[in-house]
Amino acid sequence: MTEAAEAIEELTGTQKAAILMLALEQDAATLLLQQMSERTVEEITRELASTGGVQPSVRDQILREFYDLAVAHSWAREGGLEYARSLLFQSLPAGDAERILQQISQQVRKTPFAFLQKAESTNLLTFIQDEHPQTIALIVSHLAFHKASEILSGLPGPKQIEVVKRVANMEQTNPEVIGEVEKGLEARLANMLNQSFEKIGGVETVAEMLNLVDRTTEKGIMEGLESEDPDLVEEIRRLMFVFEDILLVDDKGIQAVLKEIDNDELALSLKTASEELRDKIFKNMSERAATLIAEDMEFMGPVRVADVEAGQQRIVDIVRRLEDAGEIIIAGRGGDKDLIV
């Protein structure tokens, strides 16, 4: 084993990803990061900050590994795992081929309800609206959020609430149960398009769905849940709109929100905000006020993350209250079609 290979063996996946980001051009690295979850981006960014010099041989080996994985993944998706295995063992040493095959095998396994990905939401709704709420919850938990929200909006009010409750409480489901439901549905929808998608339930799934439905549907579901499970409603609300989503509020709305926030709390809340969000907020303040906030942030010193998050949550609560009162509009919240342009 070469020195570079030995060094790579000791690296974690996050460390390899950080080195890959350093090796790529900035535009290419940015495109890759955009495909990752926020948590993964944070982990890689943290690793980047602590990464020192990287030996060229190690860098080249990681680039090669990334390339091999990408190509093998493409083979597996187009021709199946056996096809990928055949080509890998023809083009790479046996040890490398086996290692790459193990890495991609989990990624390309058939996703439950994959055949529904390209089905039109209206057609899909027709087929599943009479199913038991638990069955519908299982199905929408494996759909893209935008498609799941369309299905949710088309269900009768009482069934909407039943489905949301089941999605929120869903954790692990027996694969055999999923397989039986999938098999029965696939037989009925044999003429529909097929491909894959992935997502499983939980409160986060509900929040993403409700972010996309119209406000009337959202309010009906939340009010229906409120009497049965107020804690669940509060949890969903906190996930539906986060601090960075203030970027979706128009300038007039930002100005309305700022009237209800004192400068100390705003300075604290902006400590971890993106530059884009800071710029948007500063743009809606007087130059003097923006300068004072920036100076407060600079000289504030270390602060507890919990304090920053608490300040941000208070501002989020103000935004949601103003939205509920119809005083501000949040872009993309399902109510845009009600606007007169």
Image (cartoon, rainbow, N blue to C red):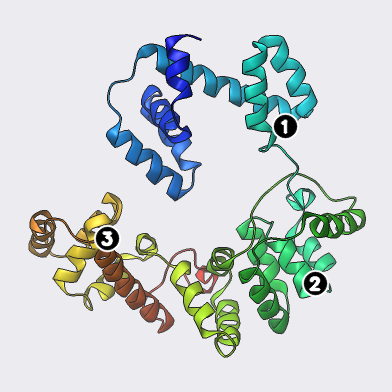
Callout in the foreground (1, 3):
3
Where is residue 176 drawn, in percent x and y? 82, 56
As displayed, is residue 230 above or below residue 258?
below
> Could you tell which of marks 2 and 3 lies nearer the N-terminus?
2
Q: Which secondary structure, mark 1?
A: helix
Q: Secondary structure at mark 3?
A: helix
Residue designated by label 2 = 129
Q: Nearer the viewer, mark 2 or mark 3?
A: 3
Q: Nearer the viewer, residue 272 or 213?
A: 272
Question: Label 3: which residue?
Answer: 305
Gap between marks 2 and 3 measured at Cα: 44 Å
Q: Position of residue 116 (x, y in %)?
A: 77, 53
Residue 90, quarter of picture:
top right
Q: What residue lies at 44% left-to-right and 31% top-to-bottom? A: 17
Q: Label 1, on which residue?
A: 77
Label located before the other in sequence (1 or 2): 1
Residue 51 vertical position relative to residue 258 in the rendered view, above or below: above
| Tag 1 near tag 2, CB within 8 Å | no
Residue 280 lies left or right of residue 7; in this view the side is left
Specify few, some or many for label 2: CA neighbours under 10 Å numbering under 14, 14-19, or 20 or more.
some
Q: Amino acid at mark 3?
A: Val
